[in-house]
């Protein structure tokens, strides 16, 4: 839209990339450069890891923007994925280190699969020692489209002091915290600069016949032609442009702003990419829910079409506030338009991921699903009185974080994406809900069974005052095949036990299997009532239950009981350099390797399958990540119960 002064529609950029690559530093530097600095910036020496999406609103050269600072850790990847669904463009922030390139692989794949336009920002350029060639080659190995370097670092001895902008063929000297200053291209760099520009033009010419003809005829394209081509190729994903800088020193930040301003598609294009039909009542999608102290519930949402005004009905609820984050503070605004990413107040009952409209039921836009959990932690209140408070808090937490799963089967267990994820969750519970909690390793769901049939006799005869209690049962207890469950059979003949008492015997027999000789539930047994005796006055349901309990307790103990442990089918996914290591890791945990194969849709990755006892899986993800640069993942499903002595 060059040449016009019309203010463009709001656009949003998501900062994504491996942990600690400098996204939050860049977030702050971008806001600074746009004249909207955070009021309370992080202490640069003690920058906290980001665990939740942060929004920042600003305008750059007159255009309104939302910046989304995403967590980098793989344990919070769901948040980054959620942010990507509402971004017009993603900036992949990474470091100038070939060894760290693999950490970008899953992200590049997600961006490609979701069709989100993206560029790469190689940050920490001040730490660059040699050139960028190795880093680019390493990144290229994981990228589906060619990377095109737009800037060449200028070295003064070992230090990067500026850059050559290849498309405009201008050189700039970095100045800390300020716009860079124009300088001569160092003569010693000219040959290298021409070669790099040649590569850039050739890559763009692969997607543009007009440009290709010029290249073949040796005609130099104008910078405008190159800018136009770069934008088109970026939008359709056929090239990935690469910029460089040092967020900490505000170097390359204005250059990045200009690239974003020029290359980021309009919100209408993002809506089209997501097959949203324009027009009609305003439509929004919630991509994050936060319970923010006195403000109450906030739903971060993108306006996909139309203009939303405060107080409107959304999904049957009256909207209670539209907010932007200016300088890091919530600021109420009267309305938001297509392309805006804002926080919406008091949308009770609205869940993360929902598409809402102020008119009728809109079609639900796709929203990412959380990866299955890989780590679990049990929690308990130190004061039982807090249990109600805890369950309320957990309810909110599950709403805030769809990558968190909660089970309450005997104990309360949090299941999530890693140890850090769950620790952050527990800290949240302690800090924001004032709960006192202890954490522990979740119990493994051991079971028991028996290996030998027995016959057992249970007899109750009691005289209490005038009225007595009497019941007599003879039962056969026998093992059943694994997975067949519990069975009660009635084989009483001749009324030795009257019909009306027999269901009580069955119930009591089943109840007795809930806790076997080792203290765990007993599975796969049959109990057959073969004979018994009764008294016409003193027999009752209660008496028959008690007699059955006596018989079951003694019978199970004599029937050669054995402990059963759950064994899961586990599939580890790793880049194939790590396949052998993954196999060793599984065998080291009593795993029985079933084989390995290429991971579907993941070139260069393998899936290793094994049967592994559940007791060995608790910290598997920790070891797996530490051995695979954080890249390895696994999924599991219950397979069978196996006899064991492990827990005795
Ligand atoms: N040398 C150098 N260090 C930087 C630069 N930018 C950021 N850092 C440092 O890198 C570390 C991580 O920075 P953050 O901005 O917190 O990184 P992040 O990507 O937000 O990290 P997560 O939120 O954990 O994913 C901090 O110690 C920063 O000071 C840079 O341009 N140069
Ligand atoms: Mg961060």
Image: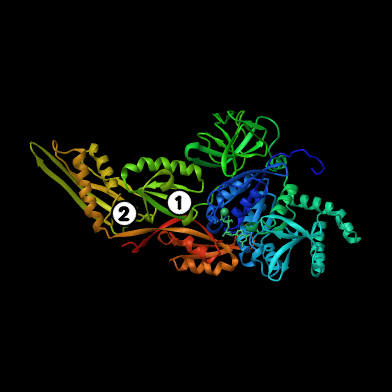
Q: Residue furthest left?
A: 466
Tell me how far mark 1 sits from mark 2, CA to CA.
23 Å
Where the C terminus falls, by quadrant? bottom left
Q: Which residue is mark 1?
A: 415
Q: Secondary structure at mark 2?
A: loop
| Dot 1 or dot 2, earlier in sequence | 1
309 lies above or below 23 = above
SS at circle 1? strand
214 versus 311 height, above or below: below
Query: Viewed as shown, does residue 33 lie left or right of 433?
Result: right
Q: Nearer the viewer, residue 509 or 31?
A: 31
- Dot 2 surroundings within 10 Å: few (below 14), some, or many (20 or more)? some
Residue occupying the point 72% across, 69% down = 156
Q: Do we see residue 525 in this rendering?
A: yes
Horizontal side of 418 relative to 444 (left or right) equals: right
Q: Position of residue 41 (x, y in %)?
A: 57, 50
Q: What percent of the width, then of the height, locates residue 147?
A: 73, 59
Residue at 61% x, 29% y: name it: 358
Q: Give the residue pinned by disc 2.
A: 520
């Amino acid at each position: 839209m060059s040449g016009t002064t019309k203010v463009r529609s709001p656009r949003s950029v998501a900062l994504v990339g491996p942990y600690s690559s400098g996204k939050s530093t860049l977030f702050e530097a971008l806001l600074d450069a746009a004249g909207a600095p955070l009021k309370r910036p992080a202490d640069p020496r003690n920058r906290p890891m980001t665990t939740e999406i942060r929004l920042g609103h600003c305008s750059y050269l007159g255009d309104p923007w939302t910046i989304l600072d995403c967590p980098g850790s793989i344990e919070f990847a769901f948040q980054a994925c959620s942010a990507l669904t509402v971004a017009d463009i993603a900036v992949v922030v990474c470091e100038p280190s070939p060894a760290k390139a693999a950490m970008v692989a899953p992200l590049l794949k997600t961006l490609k699969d979701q069709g989100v336009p993206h560029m790469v920002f190689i940050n920490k350029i001040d730490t660059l020692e040699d050139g960028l060639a190795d880093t680019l080659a390493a990144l290229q190995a994981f990228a589906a489209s060619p990377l095109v370097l737009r800037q060449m670092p200028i070295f003064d001895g070992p230090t990067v002091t500026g850059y050559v902008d290849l498309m405009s063929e201008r050189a700039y000297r970095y100045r800390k915290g300020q716009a860079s200053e124009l300088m001569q291209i160092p003569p010693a760099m000219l040959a290298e600069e021409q070669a790099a520009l040649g590569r850039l033009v050739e890559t763009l010419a692969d997607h543009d016949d007009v440009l290709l003809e010029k290249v073949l005829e040796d005609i130099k394209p104008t910078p405008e032609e190159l800018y136009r081509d770069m934008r088109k190729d970026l939008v359709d994903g056929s090239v990935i442009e690469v910029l460089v800088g040092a967020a900490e020193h505000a170097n390359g930040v204005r250059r990045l702003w200009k690239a974003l301003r020029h290359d980021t598609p309009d919100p209408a294009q993002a809506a089209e990419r997501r097959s949203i039909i324009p027009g009609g009542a305003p439509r929004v999608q919630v991509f994050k829910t936060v319970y923010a102290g006195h403000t109450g519930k906030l739903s971060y949402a993108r306006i996909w079409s139309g203009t939303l005004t405060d107080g409107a009905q959304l999904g049957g609820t009256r909207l209670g506030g539209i907010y932007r984050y200016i300088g890091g503070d919530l600021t109420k605004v009267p309305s938001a338009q297509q392309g805006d990413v804002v926080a919406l107040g008091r949308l009770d009952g609205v869940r993360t991921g929902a598409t809402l409209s102020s008119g009728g039921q809109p079609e639900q836009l796709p929203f990412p699903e959380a990866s299955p959990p890989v780590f679990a932690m049990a929690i308990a209140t130190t004061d039982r009185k807090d249990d109600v408070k805890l369950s309320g808090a957990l309810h909110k937490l599950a709403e805030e974080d769809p990558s968190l799963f909660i089970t309450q089967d005997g104990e309360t267990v949090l299941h999530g994406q890693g140890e850090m994820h769950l620790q952050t969750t527990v800290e949240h519970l302690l800090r924001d809900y004032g709960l006192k909690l202890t954490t522990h390793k979740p119990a493994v769901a051991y079971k028991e069974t028996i290996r030998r049939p027995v016959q057992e006799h249970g007899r109750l005869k009691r005289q209490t005052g005038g009225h007595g209690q009497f019941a007599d049962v003879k039962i056969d207890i026998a093992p059943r095949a694994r997975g067949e469950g519990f069975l009660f059979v009635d084989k009483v003949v001749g009324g030795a036990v009257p019909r009306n008492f027999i269901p009580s015997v069955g119930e009591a027999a089943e109840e007795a299997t809930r806790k076997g000789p080792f203290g765990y539930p007993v599975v796969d047994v049959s109990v057959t009532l073969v004979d018994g005796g009764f008294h016409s006055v003193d027999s009752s349901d209660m008496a028959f239950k008690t007699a059955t309990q006596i018989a079951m307790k003694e019978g199970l103990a004599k029937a050669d009981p054995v402990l059963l442990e759950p064994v899961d089918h586990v599939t580890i996914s790793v880049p194939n350099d790590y396949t052998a290591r993954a196999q060793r890791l599984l065998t080291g945990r009593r795993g029985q390797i079933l084989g390995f194969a290429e991971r579907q849709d993941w070139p260069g990755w393998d899936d290793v399958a094994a049967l592994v006892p559940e007791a060995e899986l608790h910290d598997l993800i920790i070891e797996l990540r530490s051995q695979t640069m954080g890249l390895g993942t696994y999924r599991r499903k219950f397979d069978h119960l196996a006899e064991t002595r492990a827990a005795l």
